[in-house]
Structures are given as structure tokens and as C-alpha cells.
Amino acid sequence: MKKRIALLLAILLMLNINVVVFAAEDEEVTEENACSTGSLEMDSEQLSSFFDNIPMIVDVKPNQLYNERLNEELGIDDENLSGGNYNIATDGDEIITDLYNLPSILSTNQISYPSKVDNSTETTFPVIKDQGYLNSCLGWSMAYYQLTNNANKIRGTAARNGSSNINSRVYSPNWVYNLGNLGNNINGMYGDSAANVLYTYGCPTISQVPIQTEDSPATNYLSWYPTASIWENALYNKCDLYFGTINPDKLDTPITSPNSTYLDNIKKILADGYVVTIETYVAPWADIYLPIVKTGRTSTNTSAYVWTEVRTVKNGGHAVTIVGYDDNFKVDINGNGSYQTGEYGAFKIANSWGTEVSNHNNGYVWLSYDALNAESSVSRSTSSYRTPAFRNDDRYYFIKPQKEYKPLLTASVGINTRYRDEIKVKLGIADAENPDDYYEENITSANYVKESSDENYFDTNIAFRYGCGNYNMSGTNGYSTGYVTFDFSSLLKNFELKYNHNYKLYIKLYDYSDSGTTIKSFILKDHNTGNTFTSDETPLSTGSNNSTIKVNVAYLSSIKSVKNDKTITLAFNSKLNEDTVNDMNVFVSDSNNNDIWIDLSLNNTEELIYLVPKNRLYNNDFYTLNISTDLKSKGGNHLSMAKNFPFYVPFH
């Protein structure tokens, strides 16, 4: 690390650059306070793909924690009231999106929110740790901090006990980093790749994939942890991804005060108890590129370090986690001895450089609202190096885990390969009786569905998509067999299963090397019954000249599947008494025997009942459609016997 710094300084001297240090304190950069970053900047094509495909946050509903916080600040005793907020969202159902109407959208529901929030004090948030020498900041921000906090918030569990993590509820930054860093530790990874790892493969906890930060062993950023049980456990933590922006109108100075409406949605998310990831610029190994660091005061008058201006720096991208905000935080940005409106308000940020790093507050640092502007709203405080603190079009990432994800079909696959970066995987399903009726997709395609039901594919270079290092799946050299678990349930968003029907599920492996790859085993698991189905076509190898292999497994479906916006139609051989078509006689229950809210309607011929899901509640679970014998025909005959029809709705 010292050699790296010395080389940088030597280059600056040779170029005869006048170095100006803008940080509040000049400080020698040493082995102890040099820190890694690791957020690569997307190019215009990547950004366009991201904005075209990922849901944008346009509003945020308050949940119970939000109301409790606001009630406490307002001195209101009634737990059901808070400044006019009467519609309380359930945890995990707070986000309102609009996929296809991106320009200039601000919140349409202007409601009160607390003047300050700090989610780092909640037991859902893990303890501050150090990413060490790995450029894994996106894994730390998205998995270790954000997924951990948001999953425990939605699930009503704790991530820590006092100052110690509960390892079985804290998620692994190394998993995300290793599956998306393209097989090197040079510059880190892209934010869209980190998000796609969580979307496609989920994430195991640090009890399964422990934190690794040091240089030894040298390959600790290379392993894909090829153990089937680790990959299966990760799937239970698959996430949805959303993004928000604090500057949809592309202004140079969108934030002029703590009351700016551009800050509303991100504050609401934080007030709901969640945290978000931002990508910014910071190269801690060269003072010229550090943000301006000053000391400010929070609403409790505690002196704290705050970044007041961020600088553009090549290969200096860093991901951090916003954990809270304080509208009354104040910092004298321009140093004139007084406070202007634009000098109030800051976000609290959790960094991944440990608790001893300089110019931080035990691992945290504040970021002034004004630093979000390309041009400061504060007079005489904008330098030529300045850039908006939120990179990539002023965007932030919001990771939403499921309260409880239940896959229907997963497959453990053994793959023997020498060069993992030369293989690509597709998953598919076909009707055994009609092979032309099939659906397949790249395992790494993030398949988001617009409100118009059109599908967009957001694909990134993560594990099993090319270019992930000239190694085997363990991250070492030579041939090795690794065992991974793929989720076939996501295919059911586009291919509905019939009950008790024969299908073929398959894996296609494309090998672009000249050394050959072998699928050693393919075992499908039905999570509804616990039954397994083993392919009799393995082992099967590619040739030595760039070939493709396909391995099938026969599957007899134990359940019907439907899409989460599906209208279910029930057909009868007699006209029905409409007075008996009600939610007492026709109803849906989930796997915990909770009734699900539905709408019922009878068609004009009075022989068909339509069931319409309310608010897309059918998602990632097993359900039962129940029909009571109290359902009657026009002639007064009861249904001969009660009927129960199990079905499954995929997550993604």
C-alpha cells in the first residue's frame, strides 16, 4: 500500500501538478488509515439499461415504525395517528413504483415525516466492520448493511445483540463480491452486477460464507463457494431491486433547504426503518480527492465529521449506506461564521472502513444535503472538482427482501470445469407431451415485469454469464467439480404448470473453451412435496471445440402454478345461485392458513366464477383455493363435496 501511494505522488511530481488539499485536516496516509473502495462507474449503455428496466420509486407509504417515530416527535399518544397519516403499510409493502413514466416525478403524497432518523441504532442494523484490502464496498453496502437491515426489518428479527452480530441473520459481502467481480480485485465491481447477484442468487449469511478481508489467502475474492447447500440457502434471501433519484429534473442545484421535496422519498424510506445504498466518489489514498471534511453539529449539539463536497476522481468510486438523516444538522460550509438555509441538513452514512478510520465518527460520517448538488446553494463554496455526491444520475438503490421466500423447484447441479469464465447457463422447462411448449432464459437475466405486464431483461456479467476469471468454481487452477443450486421457480412467471402433468426441466450449458466441461449431476427438488427427481442423462460433457450440452430431468408436477396477476376462472356444469358466490364459500388461503383478500364475480352465463387477486398479494408462496359445499346451483343443489386446489405463485 505504501508503494502504491509513493508511486502516485511521484507521478504527480513529474507532471508538475500543484496539489491542493481541501480536507479540513492534513493527514499522512498510512497503512493503518488507507482504505479500499470498489464501485465501478457504469457507462451510458449500462445506465440506460438500468433506467429502462428497474422499477423507479415514485412514492413511499408510512409503516408502523414511521408513525411511532413521528408520534414521539409530535408528542402524540395515539399509536394509530401521526400527523394525518392514517393508511399504515405493512412491512415490505411501502414502495410505490412506476416503471414506464420516469421523467420528473415527485411524491404526490406530501405528508409529515420525522425531522431526524437513525436506523443504525436499531437492532436490525449490524455492527460496523472493515472491508480491508478487498475492493468489495458494493458487497458491504448492499448485502452486509442494506440486506441485513432490510431483511430483519421486514421479518421482525434482530441482526445484533448489543455490540455483537447474530451471524445467522447478517448477510455476506464476500458472496456478492465474489460472484460479480469478474475474477479480480483490481477496481471492484459494478452496482448493477451487485444488485443482480442479490436478485438472481440471493445471499447466504456470514455464518455460511464468513467475512474475509485480508490479502491471505490471495484467492479469497475468487471462490464461488460451490457447495449446493450454501447456494440453496442463499435463494431464500432473493431480493427485489428498486431505485430512486433525488434529481429527476436534472437540475444543477436541486437541494436548497432541508425541506426540499426532492428529498421526500429517500427520507420516507429511512423513516420506515430501511437503509439505502449510494455510489459516490472517494479515493482515501490521496488527500486531493477526499471530500471536504468539516465538523458540524447534529440536532443534539454533538460535534461530528461531515462531508460537504465530493470530488470526481477516476477509479475512486465507492459505495456507502445511508442509515439516517437529521434536518437540523448544521455545518458552516463556506466558513463565513454563520449558517445559511443550505447549510442545514445531512444524511448519516455507514462506511465499511472500520471504526478507527480518520475523519469519521466511529465508522460513520455525515453527508450534507448541499453536497448532493452539482453547484452548491451556499455562496462561495463550489470548487472546480465538485460533483454531485450521488453518482449515476443522482440515484440510490433500495433492496427489498421477501418476508419469507418459498421456492417450488430448485436443482442441485454438479459442474466440473477448468475455466468458469468460458461457460454460460440457461434454465428451461418444457411440456413433456408437447415439446414446442417451452420457456427458457439465461440464469443471470433479471426478469422485471412492468405494470403493463411487458417484460424487460436486465442482464449483467455475474456468475455463469462469461468473463468471471480463468479459474474453476472454487477459484483455483485446474479441473474441479463444484455443486450449485439454481432456482427454477422463476421460470414459472412465464410458464404455468398444470397439476399432475409431466414436464422436462433442463439445463443448457454453453462452453466456449477448448478444454471441455462436464455436468456431473442434476437433481431437481420439489419443495411442495420434498420429492427429488434425478436426471439419468449425467454425466454429460462438452467437446473440445466449443459446444453446448443439454441435460433433462423428468418431473411430475405436484401443484398448479399461476402468475401473480392471474385471474383464476372456475367452471361449473350448472348455473350457480349468485347469493352463494361469496368469500365464505369460495376463498383462498396461504400456507399459514391465512385468508387472502380476493374479488369474486359471476359471469353472465352464471357458470363461471372469476377470482381476482387484490393488490398483487399472490407472491412467492403456496396457496389453496377452497370451495365449500355451501356453494349452490340455481336449482338449490349443494356442491357434492368440498374442493381444495393447491397452487403456487412464483416470486421471480
Image: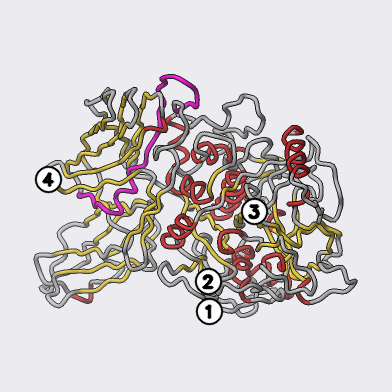
Q: Identify the disc placed on residue 321.
A: 3
- Gap between marks 2 and 3, in whole Å? 20 Å
- Gap between marks 1 and 2, in whole Å? 7 Å
In this picture, is 526 found above or below 361?
Answer: above
**At x 12% / y 45%, what residue is drawn?**
434
Q: Point out the tag, 1 or 3, that comes first from the N-terminus.
A: 1
Query: What secondary structure is found at the residue carrying circle 3?
Result: strand
Q: Residues within 10 Å of mark 4 (few under 14, many from 20)?
A: few
Name the residue that disc number 1 marks.
108
Mark 2 or 3, closer to the camera = 3
| Span highlighted in magenta in the image | 473-498
Q: Position of residue 50 (x, y in %)?
A: 46, 58
**At x 54% / y 64%, what residue is drawn?**
244
Query: What secondary structure is found at the residue carrying circle 4?
Result: strand
Name the residue that disc number 4 marks.
434
- Gap between marks 1 and 3, in whole Å? 26 Å
Q: Residues within 10 Å of mark 3 (few under 14, many from 20)?
A: many
Name the residue that disc number 2 marks.
59
Q: Identify the disc placed on residue 328.
A: none
Query: What secondary structure is found at the residue carrying circle 2?
Result: strand
**Farthest residue, direction right:** 337
